[in-house]
Image (spheres, helix red, strand yellow):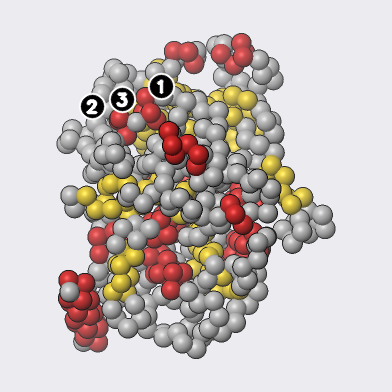
């Protein structure tokens, strides 16, 4: 009865909204209710003045088993449901009318680009390219999904900034014998290859529970998203349906089966996913739950940020370059700006608005990721909860190179070279400037007790065995995993050159992300160091870095 009453109320609201619009009056926007507001990802603030960011002219993608409907392609599609997809495909081909149209894909698209006058998505003006990956349930179908993925990545003249995966594959359908989640399923390799080659950020719905769809959550180069629910009026608690990254005791049997093999964590970020409101074509509202609806909050946030970045580039603002479009930059901006612990009002916790808790009601400060320098990501939370406005604050200061002091908040895209001497003694010695590391000196002293957030990301190198030399993936071709170079991250006193005297480090040997969130022990000047620890493939490694600090008065 409560659900029925809610639908009736929303229908009345929708009717009122349409009436106001017809009369030329101001139209209120419900905007997915709380998930886009301050209790959610705070994207509504970016949509409104003075920011006015809607994702205009930014291309994003969607790959699923099915696809959303498109007006003009599907006869049953109404022009007025408020989800205007730019192009739809069947795999890497043109779609068939009213074929493979899927309500799940429709809802996911609505979170990203919904523009109904009753409910608005995160980036309603973005260009969405969507492909239904497969039409048959064959055992070896990952090559079809890779073809669809590549096709979407090549749309908009090859300029697609992020692609949403709100689906996945079970290990039972992986073609490899005795398959495990080691990053080397065909689809996972395809994603890590495409992320680097097509320069697109892949946003993957995190695995949900035993018997789930873990492929391709074992990727290195994308972002895996868990989902939160409302807790005391804020999306701040990891929902119990999320599986997480670590397995102990009886659950240890799930390692490599439902979560990554080895020590590498799988969750990057948390976003709203419990009871997300979607406007149906008949004007009613349905509520949806799952990582499938958390991931598109992240994907569409990329569109908002990229519209701002392109605006800065067009007006030739200083400290802006085409590096702002790189997928590694988007990754570190989203992860470093994520919320962990609510600020008490003194600014020491970067004015964060919520404390994010895991399924056991523990927050970041109680986690092994906070205590251990070898663990960069929380098993259930990643680096924290998505906040689109904070991501804008992280992105908007622009790019700052290590050749001069950098401001309190910023980012960079750069490269670092391998040591000529890879011995352990050489790695731990006092190094000279330019020897396989980059130092970013902060221009202002940091405040004692304030938390600094720093995130470093780089790509695993997966290459295509391109047998016909046409520079794209074709059925029957395979990928080659060339491994992950090992980079480390340090926070050091300014003027210090010995990494043994750093105040904090992130030195995972398994992850493609390093992350520091740590309080400053005493006021003073500090620097950030990115160091090439171990060469596995190429001798020069591109990376992205983002930092957020609190300066002393």
Asked if marks 3 and 1 touch (Cβ < 8 Å), the reply is no
**Location of residue 336 (image quadrant):** top left
Q: Nearer the viewer, mark 1 or mark 2?
A: 1
Q: Residue at x 49, y 68 (%)?
A: 128
Is residue 90 visible in the rendered image? The answer is: yes
Distance from disc 3 to disc 1, alpha carbons, whole Å, reads: 9 Å
Is residue 200 visible in the rendered image? The answer is: no
The residue pinned by badge 3 equals: 519
Q: Which mark is residue 553?
A: 2
Image quadrant occupied by the C terminus: top left
Tell me: 425 left or right of 105.
right
Distance from disc 2 to disc 3, alpha carbons, whole Å, reads: 16 Å
Tell me: 94 left or right of 111.
right
Q: Give residue 438's position: percent from left, percent from top.
A: 54, 27
Q: Residue at x 32, y 83 (%)?
A: 282
Which residue is at the front of the view, 372 or 32? 372
* SS for callout 2: loop
Q: Residue at x 63, y 25 (%)?
A: 534
The residue pinned by badge 1 equals: 504
Tell me: 41 left or right of 301.
left
Question: Within 10 Å of the Cα at label 2, are there few (<14), some (14-19), or many (20+) other Cα atoms?
Answer: few
Q: Give residue 8's position: percent from left, percent from top.
A: 19, 79
Which residue is at the front of the view, 132 or 330? 132
């Amino acid at each position: 009865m409560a659900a029925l009453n809610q639908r009736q109320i929303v229908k009345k609201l929708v009717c009122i909204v349409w009436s106001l619009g017809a009369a030329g009056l101001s139209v209120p926007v419900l905007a997915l209710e709380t998930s886009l507001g301050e209790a959610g990802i705070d994207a509504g603030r970016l949509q409104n003045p003075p920011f006015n960011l809607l994702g205009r002219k930014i291309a994003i993608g969607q790959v699923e088993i099915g696809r959303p409907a498109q007006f003009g392609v599907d006869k049953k599609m109404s022009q007025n449901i408020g989800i205007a997809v730019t192009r739809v495909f069947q795999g890497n081909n043109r779609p068939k009318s009213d074929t493979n149209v899927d309500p799940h894909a429709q809802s996911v698209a609505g979170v990203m680009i919904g523009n109904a006058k009753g409910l608005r998505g995160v980036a309603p003006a973005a260009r969405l390219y969507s492909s239904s990956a497969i039409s048959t349930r064959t055992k070896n179908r990952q090559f079809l999904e890779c073809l669809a993925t590549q096709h979407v990545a090549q749309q908009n003249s090859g300029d697609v900034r992020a692609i949403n995966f709100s689906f996945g594959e079970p290990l039972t359908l992986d073609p490899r014998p005795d398959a495990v989640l080691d990053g080397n399923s065909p689809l996972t390799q395809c994603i890590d290859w495409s992320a680097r080659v097509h320069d697109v950020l892949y946003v993957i719905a995190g695995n949900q529970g035993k018997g789930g769809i873990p492929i391709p959550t074992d990727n290195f180069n994308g972002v895996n998203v868990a989902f939160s629910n409302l807790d005391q009026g804020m999306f701040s608690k990891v929902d119990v349906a999320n599986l997480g990254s670590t397995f102990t005791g009886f659950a240890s049997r799930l390692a490599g089966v439902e979560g990554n093999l080895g020590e590498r964590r799988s969750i990057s970020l948390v976003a709203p996913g419990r009871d997300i409101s979607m406007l149906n074509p008949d004007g009613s509202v349905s509520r949806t739950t799952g990582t499938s609806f958390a991931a598109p909050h992240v994907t569409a946030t990329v569109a908002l940020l990229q519209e701002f970045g392109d605006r800065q580039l067009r007006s030739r603002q200083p400290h802006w370059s085409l590096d702002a479009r790189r997928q590694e930059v988007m990754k570190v901006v989203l992860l470093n700006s994520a919320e962990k612990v609510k600020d008490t009002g003194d600014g020491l916790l970067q004015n964060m608005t919520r404390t994010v808790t895991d399924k056991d009601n523990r927050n970041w400060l109680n986690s092994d990721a906070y205590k251990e320098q070898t663990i960069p990501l929380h098993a259930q939370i990643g680096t924290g909860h998505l906040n689109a406005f904070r991501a804008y604050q992280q992105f908007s200061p622009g790019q700052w190179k290590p050749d001069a002091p950098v401001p309190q908040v910023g980012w960079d895209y750069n490269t670092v070279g391998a040591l000529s001497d890879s011995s352990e003694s050489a790695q731990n010695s006092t190094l000279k400037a330019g020897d396989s590391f980059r130092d970013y000196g902060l221009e202002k002293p940091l405040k004692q007790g304030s938390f600094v957030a720093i995130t470093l990301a780089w790509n695993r190198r997966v290459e295509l065995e391109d047998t016909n030399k046409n520079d794209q993936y074709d059925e029957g071709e395979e990928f080659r995993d060339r491994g992950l170079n090992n980079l480390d991250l340090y926070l050091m006193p300014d003027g210090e050159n010995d990494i043994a005297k750093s105040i904090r480090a992130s030195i995972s040997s398994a992850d493609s992300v390093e992350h520091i969130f740590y309080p400053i022990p005493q006021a003073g000047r500090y620097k950030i160091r990115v160091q090439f620890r171990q060469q596995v493939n190429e001798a020069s490694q591109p990376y992205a870095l983002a930092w957020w600090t609190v300066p002393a008065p």
